[in-house]
Amino acid sequence: MVNYIWFGMIILSIIVAGTNGHIEVITKAALEGAGEGVKTSLHLISIIAFWLGLMRIAEAAGLVRIVAGIMRPLTRVLFPDLPRDHPALGAIIMNLSANILGLGNAATPMGLIAMQELQKLNSEPKTASPAMCTFLALNTSCLTLIPSTIIGIRLLHNSSDPTSVVGTTIFATACGMIVGISVDRLMRFIYRIQGR
């Protein structure tokens, strides 16, 4: 759908530029936009590398394990059907801990492992289990304490206070996570009533 919207915008801009007799602005804008994209990407590499390195140090220092320990009781409530010592729980805890600390690259492999382990427990392999739905909702709406990419983009554009978004990001992601968990619980309740 987005591709169709972009295609429509490009065609419309060409028609408007051609109608006004300034078709050359299309080429100029395309080249400037591409150059700005490359420039932004190169600047972001250094910023993201810095934050990822910082987060890696935090991970090596045991911060992820501390957060994982704090989250363990919560996962027992959110995933009551999982066996207490099942590998899926460990992967889920590590994934959520990495997301909370803004370690997106570290969270993805743990998320894939968690889904693989949850699939092993799924009695209907072609349909996502309730635990898989809960994990997906949590993974996509997880609380983020350090939005490193947004901070990097704000630094790139000379923001006077690039970290000022931390508070609002924490609030927004916390709201998103609460809504995600609430909807998941509501849908579980509805399905239980319907006997599904």
Image: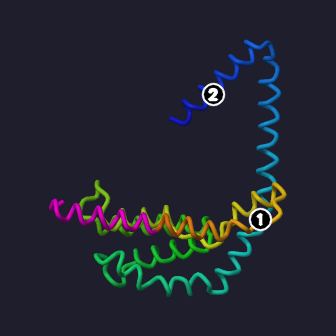
Q: Residue at x 44, y 84 (%)?
A: 72
* Disc 1 secondary structure class: helix
Amino acid under label 2? Met
Residues packed near mark 2 inside 10 Å, few (<14), some (14 to 19) or many (20 plus): few
Residue that mark 1 sits on: 162
Residues packed near mark 1 inside 10 Å, few (<14), some (14 to 19) or many (20 plus): some
The quadrant of the rendering that contains the C terminus is bottom left
Q: Report the predominant secondary structure element of the magenta stretch.
A: helix
Q: Position of residue 183 (x, y in %)?
A: 36, 62
Residue 24 picture quarter: top right
Residue 121 picture quarter: bottom left
Q: How is the image coloured?
A: rainbow
Amino acid under label 1? Pro
Q: Residue at x 54, y 36 (%)?
A: 2
Q: Position of residue 56 (x, y in %)?
A: 68, 76
Residue that mark 2 sits on: 9
Callout 1–callout 2 Cβ contact below 8 Å: no
Q: Which segment did they paint magenta?
A: 178-196
Q: Is residue 182 left or right of residue 13?
A: left
